[in-house]
Amino acid sequence: MRHVFLLLLLSVLSFGTLPAQVVVDLQRGGATVRPKTAADYAREREERQVRQERADTAAYQGCLLRAFAALGGDSLLRARELFEEALRLQPEAPGNSIVRHNIGRIHLAQGDYPRAVEQFNAVLKRLPDDRTVRHDRAAAYLQMGHAKEAVADCDILLRDEPVDSLRAALFFLRAAARMKLRLFDDARRDLQQCLALAPDREGAVLLLVMALQQGGRPQEAMQRLNLFIAAHPRSADALVLRAGMEMEQGMYEAARYDLDAAIAAEPSNGALYAERAKVLEALGLPVAARRDAARAAELSAHP
């Protein structure tokens, strides 16, 4: 019997001329050879599928680990490629909403706002109550110039009156969108609510100053800005904003003083030299203006 079994096995391996594949069942007392059945094929397919799923899962998890490591190393492009590869490996994985959210945030950081919105839309279609994703979509809309859509997202998020860390950011974001829509009074109210929640938020203070100025309240705007600069004398953004307001009033010496202070605070910021060049030109100092313009160009070429 042993010789018969070996002969059969050899014929299968060497010639492959049997009309159908066979299965060798090793049983107690000997071995039998029988044709493969549909159940055998189904079992093999299932085993192959299980092995492939395990391999894909391991590769998926590896992609995510490397993607988050790339984010930690500020390699946004590599992180996005790895996140996208994870989606390709397991398009229906339960954690893909987080993956898509991260891809969207990378597009947002890279300035590719339409693709960011595309990813955020995909997440919100599945998780419409995800507050952080909707906030990020509103930010992307604002950068695209779609201020009305940004306001609409903020309205949805603020409607439920949640008390969370996102609330101040939402008031700020809606205020910025309303500024684009020239709704200065509405923007001012949003910024006041933002500052009630986060009184030290510099961007909110400066945007409120702009809302007051553009809303026809320049004296109040300047008073608020002066108070802020008195408390934060090295805030380059605040100094530049005040210099711009002073230039509008023809106060070029005061503007130069503020820009000198801003450059002292941020000597590698080329935009500050460009602004001061304008002031120096207005003051009739063309040599100094050209020197600042050259320095601005140098810093812009080597940021």
Image (spheres, helix red, strand yellow):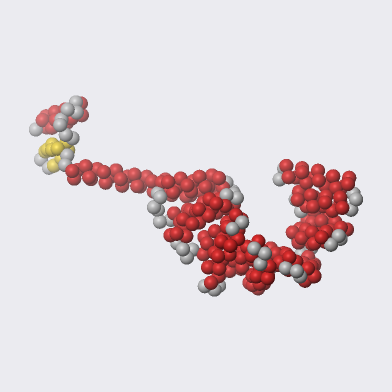
Depth check: give the residue in front, 143 or 103. Answer: 143
Query: Looking at the image, is 100 positioned above or below residue 27?
Result: below
Who is closer to the viewer here, 188 or 223?
Answer: 188
Q: Identify the residue shown where x is 23% and y is 45%.
A: 43
Pick the front one: 69 or 204 = 204
Farthest residue to the left: give it. 1
In percent of the image, x 53 and y 50: which residue is there?
Answer: 115
Q: Vertically, is 239 above or below 14?
A: below
Residue at the image position 49 percent from the left and 46 percent from the top: 82
Estimate the x, y position of residue 23 in percent, counting from the top left: 17, 38
Is residue 191 among the parts visible in the rendering? no
Quarter location, residue 147: bottom right
Residue 62 percent coordinates (x, y): 45, 47
Picture mark count: 0
Estimate the x, y position of residue 303 in percent, counting from the top left.
71, 45
> On the picture, is 160 further left or further right than 186?
left
The quarter of the image holding the N terminus is top left
Which residue is at a point 59% across and 49% down the rendered structure image?
110
**Image location of residue 208, percent across then percent down:** 70, 67
> Looking at the rendering, which quadrant does residue 145 occupy?
bottom right
